[in-house]
Image (cartoon, rainbow, N blue to C red):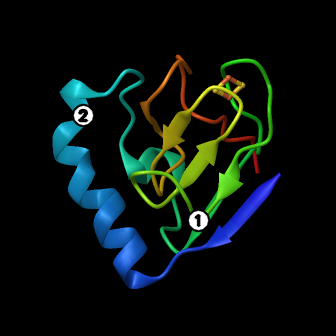
């Protein structure tokens, strides 16, 4: 499980990228993934083949999976690489 307390800059970046939803592989609004925007709670498993991504890294400053190069943004949405889905948000 990854629990990230997002800074105001992190939240702004995630919400700004909501405007790019149509270009996302697994389109989801940030507000639907982080109802309280200060806290992002996701299952820390890459949706490609199950490696553990590195936090605070990748081209969008979110998560980077070194196994095959998937990049996730500050909302845990996949943005680049072979993963086909966003990192999962568990019920909480
Ligand atoms: Fe993460 Fe393949 S397991 S990119």
Position in image of residue 34 (x %, y %): 53, 56
Question: Regarding ligand 1, which quadrant of the image does it lie in?
Answer: top right
Position in image of residue 42 (x %, y %): 69, 48
Foreground pick, 65 / 77:
65
Horizontal arrangement in the rendering, residue 70 relative to residue 17 (left or right) = right
Q: Which residue is mark 1?
A: 56
Horizontal arrangement in the rendering, residue 66 relative to residue 13 (left or right) = right
In the picture as drawn, the residue positioned furthest to the bottom comes out as: 8
Assign a secondary structure to mark 2.
helix
Instruction: Give the alpha-carbon distance from disc 2 to disc 1, as whole Å.
Output: 21 Å
Assign a secondary structure to mark 1.
loop
Q: Give me the disc on residue 66.
A: none
Which callout, 2 or 1, points to the residue nearer the camera? 1
Q: Which residue corresponds to the image point at 41% horizontal and 72% vertical from the top-left?
A: 10
Q: Quadrant of residue 20?
A: top left
Q: How many marks?
A: 2
In the displayed structure, 31 sits above or below 90; it is below
Mark 2 CB lies closer than 8 A to ligand 1 = no
In the displayed structure, 49 sits above or below 28; it is above
Position in image of residue 21 (x %, y %): 24, 34
In the displayed structure, 35 sits above or below 87; it is below
N-terminal label among 2 and 1: 2
Q: Which residue corresponds to the image point at 75% horizontal and 18% vertical from the top-left?
A: 49
Mark 1 CB lies closer than 8 A to ligand 1 = no
Q: Which residue is mark 2?
A: 21
Horizontal arrangement in the rendering, residue 54 relative to residue 51 (left or right) = left
Badge 2: how crowded within 10 Å, few (<14), some, or many (20+)? Answer: few
In the displayed structure, 40 sits above or below 70; it is below
């Amino acid at each position: 499980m990854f629990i990230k307390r997002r800074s105001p800059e992190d939240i702004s970046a995630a919400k700004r990228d909501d405007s790019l939803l149509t270009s996302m592989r697994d389109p989801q609004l940030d507000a639907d993934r982080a109802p309280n925007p200060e806290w992002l709670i996701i299952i820390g498993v890459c949706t490609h083949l199950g490696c553990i991504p590195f936090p605070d890294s990748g081209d969008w400053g979110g998560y980077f999976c070194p196994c095959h190069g998937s990049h996730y943004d500050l909302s845990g949405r996949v943005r680049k690489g072979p993963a086909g889905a966003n990192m999962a948000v568990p019920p909480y």
